[in-house]
Image (cartoon, rainbow, N blue to C red):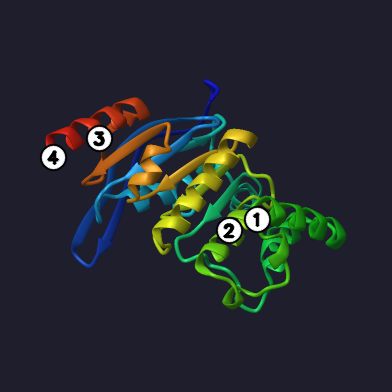
Amino acid sequence: MTSDIIIRTENVKKRYVTGEEVLWALKGIDLDIQRGEFLSIMGPSGSGKSTFFNQIGALDRPTEGRVLFEGHSIFDLSESQQAWFRCNRIGYIFQTFNLIQVMTALQNVTLPMVFQGVSKEEAARRGTAILERVGLGHRLHHKPLELSGGQQQRVAVARALANTPHVVLADEPTGNLDTQTGSEIIELLKTLNREEGVTVICSTHDPKMLRNSDRICWMLDGQLDKISSQAEFSLEAMKQDTQGR
């Protein structure tokens, strides 16, 4: 992991207004994320982690504060520039896979390349290589309903890598998977992070994901409660295990 910052959030706040009710989902988040880092965001339901996740990925605009990507404020960009940023710099992996059911695995993976202007032949070549990379070279022409949940998530991982993003955002990527398949997806993400230097940011409840993270950001009531290094998390888990015996 290198020492340069790829994403920085400065006093990020998010407010939702429903009628007369005002809810501050984020109450001022300051965080530096290092290039090549494997970071997990952890917190109970309603803690603000999904909202914060969406600010990082430029899926939602903060009410206050800034999100900087490689030193540039994302939300100072025009809408077309933000769309280019989401297409070319960020890869998204969702808990529910979000695959297009009428398309094959290869078509799902190459779709982002269409928006990037890649030729059909080059997209097919790159898409095939990526699916082979995630262990699905033998399922190129299968549609999502012909694939297992784990295979569908692998297609989602491949699609996230289609345009060689700098950052992969994974929202509960193991949430709909059984334990073994979830472990395989975690190992796949960790391998991509380690071998290709992709920065991986996960919103998760999965303890196995935490054990594979460089740092864990714990959120509570719209704020960063604490940040743990892998060593600190392992030590705390060891203490709890010892106390439980």
Q: Quadrant of residue 13?
A: top left
Q: Earlier in the sequence, mark 4 or mark 1?
A: 1
Of mark 4 and mark 3, the one earlier in the sequence is 3
Mark 4 or 3: in front is 4
Question: Between marks 4 and 3, how big is the CA–CA gap?
Answer: 11 Å
Write down the residue under mark 3.
237
Task: Find residue 135 and name its label.
Answer: 1
Question: Which kind of residue does numbered mark 3 sit on?
Answer: Ala
Q: Nearer the viewer, mark 1 or mark 2?
A: 1
Verify CB contact (< 8 Å) between mark 1 and mark 2.
yes
Residue at image position (40%, 44%) is: 209
Q: What residue would you read off at disc 4?
A: 244
Report crowding for label 2: few under 14, some 14 to 19, many 20 or more residues within 10 A (C-alpha): many
Rounded to the nearest whole Å, what is the CA distance between mark 4 and mark 1?
39 Å
Camera-nearest label, 2 or 3: 3
Q: Earlier in the sequence, mark 1 or mark 2?
A: 1
Q: Dot 3, how many residues are within 10 Å of its Cα: few (below 14), some (14-19), or many (20+)?
A: few
80 displayed left or right of 60: right
Q: Position of residue 205 (x, y in %)?
A: 32, 51
The image shows residue 101 at horizontal and vertical percentages of 60, 77
Q: CA distance from mark 3 to mark 1?
A: 32 Å
Label whose residue precedes the other's in the sequence (3 or 1): 1
Query: Which residue, given by chain and number where applicable, does mark 2 sit on?
Result: 154
Which mark lies nearer to you, 4 or 1?
Answer: 4
Q: Secondary structure at mark 2?
A: helix
* Residue, far front: 245
Q: CA distance from mark 1 to mark 2?
A: 8 Å
Structural crowding at the residue carrying mark 1, measured as other residues with C-alpha within 10 Å and reported as few (<14), some (14–19) or many (≥20): some
Residues marked 4 and 1 touching at CB (< 8 Å)? no
Answer above or below: position of 181 versus 49: below
